[in-house]
Image (spheres, coloured by chain):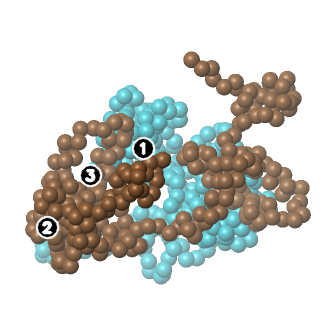
Chain colours: A cyan, B brown
Amino acid sequence: MKRELIVMDERAWAEDAIRTHNLGNNIGVSLSIVARYYYYEEKKEKGELVSALRELLLRHNPNINIYAYTNLINDIVSCVAKYPLTYVPYLNITKKEVDVVMSVEGKMARRVLFALLCIAKFGNARTAKNNNWVNLPMSSVFAYSNVSTSRSRQDIIIKSLRDAGYIEYSPIIDNLNIRVPFIDDSDSFVWRVYDFDNLGYQLEMNSGVKGYMICDYCGRITRRSNNRQKYCRDCATKVNIIKTVDNRKKLQTV
Amino acid sequence: MCKPMPKHWYDFKAAIEADGGERGRNVKLLADRKPYFMRYIYPDLNKRYKEHTANTDRKCAWMFGISFEELTALENPTEEQTQFIGYTNGRRPVGTNRCVMNRVCWYIESRFSKEFRSKKINGSYFDRSILMTNAEFTRAQYYGIYSLYKDYTSILKRNTATIRIDGKVEDTTPLLEIRAQFSRDCMKICTNAEQLANVIVDVCYKHEGTKQFMWDVCSTEVIFNILRRNGMKISYPVFSPDDYEFMLNGRKYKMVEAIIDEARIDSNG
């Protein structure tokens, strides 16, 4: 499922993107982060920013049509000074919030509510004016919550959460933003969220549901397919290649 | 120099101010939105309208569990539902009053239904054999030309965007050189012009995308093929005020036929 990028440590993300020349799938958001990094950390002037961003874009994809991104780059550079780099090392989920989430009936609805809670808290950490709002598209929210379902079923889940009072809608009729009113940072925290990968699985694992594990290689939470599993599916292939290469080297030296 | 439109003609706040804080004549005459049919003239307006429609439909599902179309069809809507319909109409970026042009637009939309619009014209609907001969080609030739086709279309896209950005036609010499180079590369893969044309037509029409590659590299051969199928005969309209078959823009024309001499066709279109 396609989802909007949420980056908790934009400085580290930008450094990684510049080093590896990889801007991911969401070019607009990625360029915005890198532009702010160049502006705040490397103190580049706005004139230098445009050429730096174009160069990075060409390194990311040499076949890219650079002229199609002219307006985007100009828009990003014009408002680069508006927002600082985001640094949210973790999100504290308090006991009251966990109790509210766990009181929801239905696994899918619980995961979606937990994702909404985390995204709203992230928004609050970024800006004091956020006021518990989630302004991401629902497709991203459902992707982060590891709930893969039809559009009509998504609407039913959202409606049920609202009818039960867990979320609120925007009063503007064509605005799909959602507010999470039960956020309460005054209580003691019980969980910490360090990244937005697989929020649904994080909820399951933290609440003691079996069948989830942490990958030994990348640290992501993933579903377990057997009891001896150590790595997630992506890392299993990489680790296998690394171990095979190491073993062959050892055999050659012997 | 002409004056701009008075603000109270199109801005709600200015209209209220002009009416002294109340909803008076200026608010009643306010033209704050373009009419519905103009969504087909302004792409930005069309985008805003589609977003509004999609969002209100989804919000309606979230609030009442039904689509907006179903909500408007309800016989006894509740107060909240009536309010929702009212707010939706108020926030719509286009005006849906039953003026003549709007009604014409809705009529045309109903005739051009979704089913009709979704039938995309692609290679599978077009009989490409009319552009080809019976000369056969190998798979190696096909894939060799296909790889050149992909490179050519990506270069073309880049160059076209460059030209469009500045809004004027750039120097076309580089493009002509690229075209000539690709023609030479294609001839290396397939030396027979007839076979080459067949391969290129097959490649272009089997894949959805621009056919410019075909017209740039083997246009002469393709035109030859079409002409040969029609006995080298072409029909074209000539101006004929006395003995005419049809009219266009107030002028009278008739169709005449001519036989084309193969030797007279220029090479490379």
User: Closer to the camera, B171 or A140?
Assistant: B171
**Gap between marks 2 and 3 measured at Cα:** 24 Å
Callout 3 secondary element: helix
Crowdedness of circle 2 by 10 Å Cα count: few (<14), some, many (20+)?
A: some
Task: Determine the chain carrying the residue at label 2.
Answer: B
Image location of residue A61, percent across then percent down: 31, 51
Secondary structure found at label 1: helix
Could one spot residue A251 in this view of the protein?
yes
Residue B202 is situated, as x and y percent measured from the top left of the image, at 27, 71
Quadrant of res A233: bottom left
With respect to residue A211, does A90 lie above or below? above
User: Viewed as shown, does residue A243 lie left or right of A204?
Assistant: left
Q: Which mark is residue B193?
A: 2
Question: Do the residues under discs 2 and 3 have CB atoms within 8 angstroms?
Answer: no
Q: Which residue is mark 3?
A: B155
Residue at figure coordinates x 89%, y 59% from the top left = B78
Q: Look at discs 2 and 3 and give the one toward the viewer.
A: 2
The residue located at (71%, 32%) in the rendering is: B10
Q: Where residue A129 sits: x, y (%)?
A: 67, 38
Label 1 packing within 10 angstroms: few (<14), some (14-19), many (20+): many
Question: Which is more foreground, mark 1 or mark 3?
Answer: 3
Say which amino acid is labelled 3.
Answer: Ile
- What is the x, y in percent for residue B37? 64, 49
- Is B130 in front, or is A117? B130
Residue A31: give its label: 1
Left or right position of A227 against B191: right
Q: Nearer the viewer, residue B12 or A74?
A: B12
Q: Amino acid at mark 2?
A: Ala
The chain under label 1 reads: A
